[in-house]
Amino acid sequence: MSEKKLNENKICFISCVNNDEQYNKCLESWKALRVPEGMTVESVVIHDAKSMTEGYQAGMKISDAKYKIYVHQDVWINSKNFLHIMVEAFKKHPEYGILGVVGSKSLPTNGIWWEGEKIGSIRDRVSGDFAEYLYDRNDRECVEAIALDGLILMTQYDIPWRADVFTSWHFYDVSQCMEFLKQGYKAAVLPQSLPLCDHYAKMNTMKGYDEERTKFLKEYLPFLRSINCAKGNNGEKAESVVIVIPVYKKDLEYEEKISLRQLNSVLGRYPRVFIAPESLEFDYGILGDNISVERFADHWFQSVTSYSCLMMQKEYYERFSKYEYMLVYQLDVFVFSDRLKEFCDKGYDYIGAPVGKFVPFWHAIDARVGNGGFSLRRIPAHLRVLNDFDRIVRDTPFFPCFILAEDVFFGYCGKREDVEFTVADFKTASEFSVQENVCHVYSKFAEGWRPFGCHGWSQVESDFWWPLIAAYGYEPPEKIEKLTLYTHAVLRDYIKHRNNINLQPSWGWIRRGEKLNLEKFWKDVIEKYPEGNPAWERRLEEMTCFWCAVIENVNRGHLSKDTDREPFLIAVYRAMKSGEAAKYLWEMWDMMLPILGREPYSVKDVIIKLVLEKKLEKFVEIELGKIDKLLCEKGQMTEKQYSIESQVRMRAGQKLFEKAIAWNISTETELWKRYGAEVIKL
């Protein structure tokens, strides 16, 4: 604590300012406040601060005022008696070192104050129109807090701000509360019935938040736990975790039994729950002992896509709301040791295995963490983003990808500056889990290092994993498949085709908002590689991702709205025409038609026609299967049953032909000819 003699009759407003116009408007409200008798008021402005802690530390050194008010440049003080309320509170309670207007009585061990028991009030315009937030408060007495929001903080003692640790614009407030508490002082919110302040913030940016939170937990987590224990909160909720094991079949494969046995052996002391379809009858014998079951409707387990959708349902996480964390443990996971509490203590909202550097949709959202098959999820945070799901996915072209891969959605949330969701950094994720592409950790494994677990070991690179797993007492099968270089193959394919069209510079231009470089490069590509050129072969996924990334960055304001997107759509069309693409890509484009339809380029019309053609072909294939089944079972039906079924199929055929006509799609293809012939057979 500073030994400087402080003037007990002086109040000082200290602000870090980068918008003088906004600051001067709010300063008017501060100058209009009634000043306690015999006291003076001054203001200190810090320009060009590198961080809030650096700026506030500089302001603290400049002023000798006993009562310092650290306030954002965009805070308007409503109550004319604000200074009287503050000084009276400090004089009445010399044990109060720091005061605010909004904060929390408790602080979860993830360091996020607003997920604690909120107190105080504020009128805030951070998300658009003004909203009034009224929490637990007292209009006569201060309410004791552990953490305070930094929009306005008041102190009566000088304790250094931790500029040596926090180098951004986050956690300066909560860390300063910890510093006062460590010195034996208390934190509290001022007496209030209605909000004392209006906050005029334009946007709540989360950039750099996760890095500062990691620093905060490293610096204060042991102290925070001691506070929780002293206040009768032993942290059980913050540290509690449930392990969920998705199952969908009656009997387990050999490798799945190993996965489950290892789970029970290493993590058997934690609550474990099977996630199963309502109709599934299963008994895994001793492997299922002490594992409870939560059942969900069968339709969530029909495919990878339906399961992905289940993992984005609020109901799913609400079933486990008594826990703070959920470890998703699919039965192609192997854990090496119990490090579960270690990763819970890091406080992230989501941790999963890192994904390959060139996996297209992860690359497009600029994220590397991480795969959901073995993942640690903080349940309150997942419920929070799912409550905000409609806003988050509004107008994003990535929505179809989220349906197919829910982990991409949560990775995406971690990259959005306007979404409060923290995803682990790459290094932490690598310690948590290793998946495909294990070559980057060969040497570490050889030296005895092990991650918390691995995912997909029985399907990918199994001849690498089996010797490691055998060391834990599990007998390998007689035949081990040769090394499956899944990610290496993707990378090799990418590099091979990159010799023709190297997209790497384009990704950088998107990230940096370099519109002119982006447009010039793609116009040159379109001119150099006409339709039918081999350079477009097997490039649809990459071109789809690129177009999505451009749309996304335009929507987020990182690229100019007038960015010419026609070359990207031409590239998509040429990739579509170059050959057979994976079915999921056509399904994705089907879902993206509303966004595509808003594009002002004529090439969209031929793309839409191709997508509708593929959509109709899918319907035809389904109907062909039903016709084949009907013809096979004809002898087992009564004449009446067959007549009814055949009429249903013929009506379906009529509707398909009507769709083809409406969508201007030719029925002269071999598929359509076969379909017509099959209908005639009925």
Image (cartoon, rainbow, N blue to C red):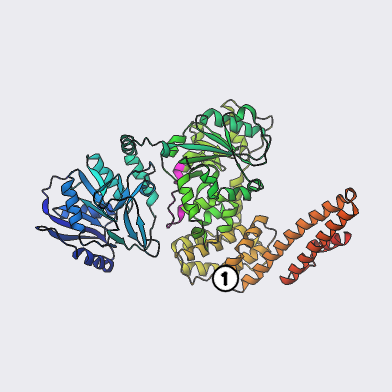
Residue 82 located within the stretch drawn in magenta: no
Q: Nearer the viewer, residue 65 or 571?
A: 65
Quadrant into which the C terminus falls: bottom right
Quadrant position of residue 608: bottom right
- The quarter of the image holding the N terminus is top left
Q: Position of residue 313 (x, y in %)?
A: 55, 50
In the picture provided, is 56 more to the left or to the right than 326? left
Q: Residue furthest left?
A: 38
The residue sitting at 36% across, 56% down in the picture is 133
Q: Local crowd at mark 1 within 10 Å, few (<14), some, or many (≥20)?
A: few
Q: Is residue 34 above or below residue 345?
A: below
> In the image, is residue 239 above or below residue 90?
above
Observer-nearest of 186 and 611: 186
Answer whether residue 539 is visible to the viewer in this image. Answer: no
Principal secondary structure, stretch drawn in magenta: loop
Relative to 593, is 614 on the left or the right? Answer: right
Q: Which residue is mark 1?
A: 598
Amino acid under disc 1 = Arg
Q: Which residues are magenta?
A: 414-428
Q: Position of residue 586 (x, y in %)?
A: 66, 59
* Above or below: residue 477 compared with residue 120: above
For the question of whether residue 587 can be seen, the reply is yes
Q: Seen in the image, is 510 located left or right of residue 134?
A: right
Q: Tell me the residue at 53%/43% (across/down).
A: 319
Q: Position of residue 530 (x, y in %)?
A: 64, 69
Q: Percent position (x, y) of residue 85?
A: 20, 55
